[in-house]
Image: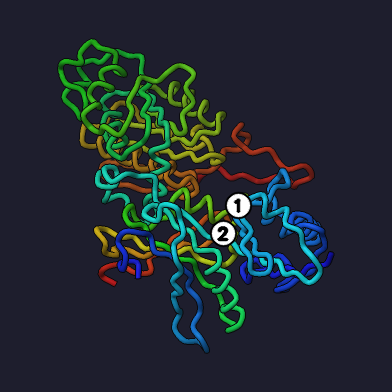
Amino acid sequence: MPVTVRIPAPLRSLTGHRSEVSASGATVRQVLEGLALAHPGLRERLLDGAGAPRRHLGLFLNDEHLLGPAGLEAPVKDGDQLTLVPAIAGGAPELDEERIARWARQLLVPGFGAGGQERLMASRVRVVGADAVAAPALVYLAQAGVGTLWIDDPELAGPADMGGWLLGPEAAGQPRAAAAVAALAPFSRFVSVEPYPVGGVPTATLVVASSSAQALGAAEAARRARIPHVVLEADGDGGSVVSVPVGAPCYACARLATGSGRPPAPGAAALAALAAQELLLLIADPAAIAGRRLELIRGVSSVRPSARLPGCACHPPAAPGAEPTTVDAEG
Amino acid sequence: MAEADPDQEACGLVVDGPAGGEVEPWPLPNRAADPRRAYLLGPPELLAALRRLDAEGRVLLAVYHSHLAGGAELSQQDLASALVDGTPLLGGVAQVVVALEHGHAVLVRAHRWRGARYVGGDLWTPVS
């Protein structure tokens, strides 16, 4: 039976800007299925992959609001008018009042806000390395409200780890990971801080490894698992932070192969703060930043987009039939 | 309007002004089960508003709602409702969020779809 279907203005681009279209069927469901066949663009808005009506749309048959699955089986007759109405809804951030009070300042940061905080709360961050350079980053991540902080460091705490941001003399001789877990406990009761569980799959990784080989290994493992990651490289004068969102040029492409040693404590703290901030941005809004390298040399910072080295394994496979892509190494 | 009832999220439409005049907010009742933490534009009232939009030849510019706390970014629930398979349900329509703190507006942001994500911009701040 032909039925007139009224299309709301925001959806008319899917029906050739027509405000009314005709569709046939004995029930509302059949009318919708007919409409989906006639207007493929509209189909995705009407029905999900299994052919069930989506929750994003409301339906009125003449002026009666159809509710639930039973409404779809309502019979229609010649001359009936079916009106589609978008279901416009949303919800407050999943933050209780305590958490809102705890993170009130960063919730107001444009581009971060409640959505970003929710994503932080749901995140599992693996931090590879818990030495004195990593310590400020661990504190920042805990205080920012990541959901779970996994600390991955098999070494024992030594004299160089003491007296910094995190570990005191009582940590001497203890495994760094366990000592860091204990030291971070007071920083936020909203964050779960644990030693990294073997096989655990993080949502983001921060690499503050004590050797280049370890950093390359941890970064490559994250890249292969499509986990956004940030790598901190300290050297004698400062260092760099390499941010690798999913699909960006890898750490091996973007790293600096210079420098060695550790910067003095203030420099390390600044580097660690940069690294933590980059990781928080990657979690809060994965599309917000592209792959890049931030350099901090003797207190002066600079940012450069990272680029793929020719032939690197991180190059995305070319689409079938596509022209070869020219990739320039960073100059 | 968002400050008028500090116990529930305000919501409604923003439409262009008649004959090129100033844009107008069209408040609609919040029919969510828990209006302190969610909003749902009342379907019958929304139907009536859309019919009026057509009858007057007006254009829907944005959907607005308030957050009683928690800032002016789109929440995960906001995004889940606004997107169908990763694209906006309402093409070309901005999402405006009014952030309240202790019942007073502190920030208003408009989120517009830019290719692959909503990008927010301040519409109003306490010093604007």
Percent of width and height locating residue A26: 81, 58
Q: Is residue A166 left or right of residue B49?
A: left
- Which quarter of the image is occupied by the C terminus of chain B? bottom left
Determine which residue is flagged by label 2: A87
Residue at 75% x, 69% y is A80
Q: Judge whether A105 appears above or below B104 on screen.
A: above
- Which quarter of the image is occupied by the N terminus of chain B? bottom left
Mark 2 closeness class: few <14, some 14–19, many ≥20 residues within 10 Å: many
Residue at 32% x, 44% y is A96
Determine which residue is flagged by label 1: A55
Q: Are marks 1 and 2 in contact (CB under 8 Å)?
A: yes
Q: Judge whether A127 appears above or below B43 on screen.
A: above
Amino acid at circle 1 = Arg
Residue at 30% x, 34% y is A190
Residue A237 visible here:
no
Q: Nearer the viewer, residue A26 or B36?
A: A26
Residue A128 appears in which quarter of the rendering? Answer: top left
